[in-house]
Amino acid sequence: MVSIEEFEMIADEIANSIPEEFYRRLNGGILVSESEKLHPKSLPFAPLYIMGEYSYSRDLGRMITIYYGSFSAVYGYLTPEDLKKEIRRTLLHEFTHHLESLSGLSDLEVKDKIELEQYKQHTKLHSKLCAENKNT
């Protein structure tokens, strides 16, 4: 895995390639956090990492956070070029949340909820199969 400094440089390069109008009202900008973040619904045997998140609060405003630790845990084996693709995908995903928030849409939020439900169903099935194998 690249160092956090290299990760930040890659993230900055991608951020600089995003059209300026996407940054409208993103007053908190883009933050790279060194930590990893697990989704609250994550299960120990199938960790669900949060790679990035868009947040809005009256106090702090609108910002995007990208989690270096989550990228290290999930994509630590990738080449820098492939890692760059994943960072780009995550940043564009979070910008979509930002732009939808400004326009009052929630299509991507709905899609994320569907994907979370699929994760829960998949892990429930996996857990059941493991328990059945243990009993045989």
Image: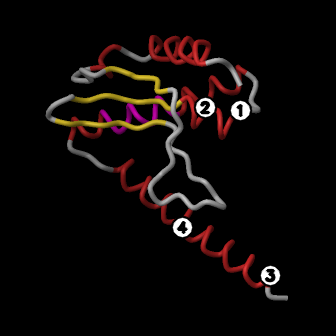
Disc 3, disc 4: CB below 8 Å?
no
SS class of the residue under badge 3? helix
x and y, in percent, of residue 1 in the image: 71, 25
Marks 1 and 4, the one that precedes in the sequence: 1
Q: Distance of mark 2 from mark 4, alpha carbons?
A: 23 Å
Which quadrant would residue 55 be assigned to in this image?
A: top left
**Please, what is the three-letter code of the amino acid marked with disc 4?**
Lys
Q: Is residue 51 magenta?
A: no
The image position of residue 24, as x and y in percent, is 24, 21
Is 54 on the left or on the right of 127, as rendered? Answer: left
Residue 62 % position (x, y): 25, 29
Q: Are marks 1 and 3 in contact (CB under 8 Å)?
A: no
Model colouring: secondary structure
Circle 2 is placed at which residue position? 86
Q: Nearer the viewer, residue 82 or 3?
A: 3
Image side of residue 105 versus residue 68, left or right: left
Q: Is residue 101 left or right of residue 132?
A: left
* Residue 91 is inside the magenta segment: yes
- Which of the two discs, 2 and 3, labels the residue nearer the N terminus? 2
The residue singled out by tag 3 in the image is: 134
Classify mark 1: helix, strand or loop.
Answer: loop
In this figure, which residue is indicated by the disc labeled 4? 120
Q: Which residues are magenta?
A: 90-98
Choose the circle earlier in sequence order: 3 or 4. 4
Residue 99's label in the rendered image is none
Q: Are marks 2 and 1 in contact (CB under 8 Å)?
A: no
For residue 123, above or below residue 136: above
Which quadrant is home to the C terminus? bottom right
The residue that label 1 is drawn on is 76
